[in-house]
Amino acid sequence: MSELSYYYELADKLAETRDLTDEEFSSLLFFRNPQFAEYLSQKARTIRERYYGKSVYLRGLIEFTNFCKNNCYYCGIRRGNATAERYRLTEEQIVTCSDSGYALGFRTFVLQGGEDPYFTEERIASIVAAIRKRHPDCAITLSVGEHEEESYRRWFEAGADRYLLRHETASKAHYERLHPQDMSFTHRMQCLKTLQKIGYQVGCGMMVGSPWQQTADLVADLRFLQEFQPQMVGIGPFIPHHDTDFADQPAGSVELTLRLLSVIRLILPKVLLPATTALGTADAFGREKGILAGANVMMPNLSPGDVRGKYLLYDNKICTGDEAAECIRCLSIRVERIGYQVVESRGDPAGF
């Protein structure tokens, strides 16, 4: 059997069983061959189209605060970055963003921010309830970090449907090299389990190529995804920010990110899988390549134009100057060119 034939068989096995041995996952992730890359992507597209057809779902991203109490070593809005230009949107501004997005066809809003103590449990519940009242047919997603069960439950009862909390890495040792001592890997994982217990559609995810990441760490991520069974997985290449401890570290691989998108689609056939802004930042056609690798979600920005350039988790973030309507038109055209279609939909996970 030729080497290429062996890897074709591995891809077939993964598509059929949704699993490989650790050694097989490791070798599949790093087998560099353009024919195999396309074969694996085609497998992933076939599975994605079985459940979602040619549809690509848009999420309206509202980045409402870049204050954060945490000091994650990789993040541009970390507490210790004294050069970050901080901002907070008011509840009225946030709701207005949702109104504008609704008029443009968005049926999911993602409220994302740092872990900002100003936005208390009560304030976030009020914002969620206000959007839910104005747009009852829409999905509301929160992405505001680690909190306790009481807060998560209150926000769910106020009308939040989904929660995004990237685990960043499923390896405790690796996690502790990316975060200061006052942050807990165990607590991060417990938060994900709590969200799932409450009934949220839960999203997790990891950076690809973050400092000190080993092949075994990526395999651990895949094992975690298999066990946890999230409704969404957001991954993107690590991109350094100039005001962090990792400013001089190399960026993560676009090729490996695309490979992981396809593998995740095969192990979690019904998952919602974004072609992330980070992927589009690392490669001019990264989002299209992500869709062709099995992704089915994009997240244009609905934040006010005067703050978009301030929510910089990493350097050179794209689309910080685009108006939302302009961004939708651009994305729609780009998606159509590769044979897919942006649709006006909540885009719930198949079978949830």
Image: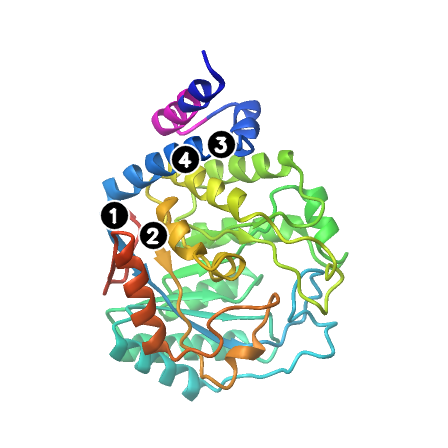
Classify mark 4: helix, strand or loop: helix
Classify mark 3: helix, strand or loop: loop
| Numbered tag placed on residue 91 in the rendering | none
Q: For the residues carrying marks 2 and 4, which lies nearer the camera in this image?
A: 2
* Contact between labelled residues 3 and 2, with CB atoms less than 8 Å apart: no
Q: Amino acid at mark 3?
A: Asn
* Contact between labelled residues 2 and 1, with CB atoms less than 8 Å apart: yes
Residue 76 inside the magenta-drawn segment: no
Residue holding disc 2: 296
* Contact between labelled residues 4 and 1, with CB atoms less than 8 Å apart: no
Q: Most prominent secondary structure in the magenta stretch?
A: helix
Classify mark 1: helix, strand or loop: helix
Classify mark 2: helix, strand or loop: loop
Query: Of residues 170 and 21, which is closer to you in this image?
Result: 21
Q: Position of residue 175 (x, y in %)?
A: 68, 48
Residues in magenta, as a range: 9-19
| Numbered tag placed on residue 267 in the rendering | 4
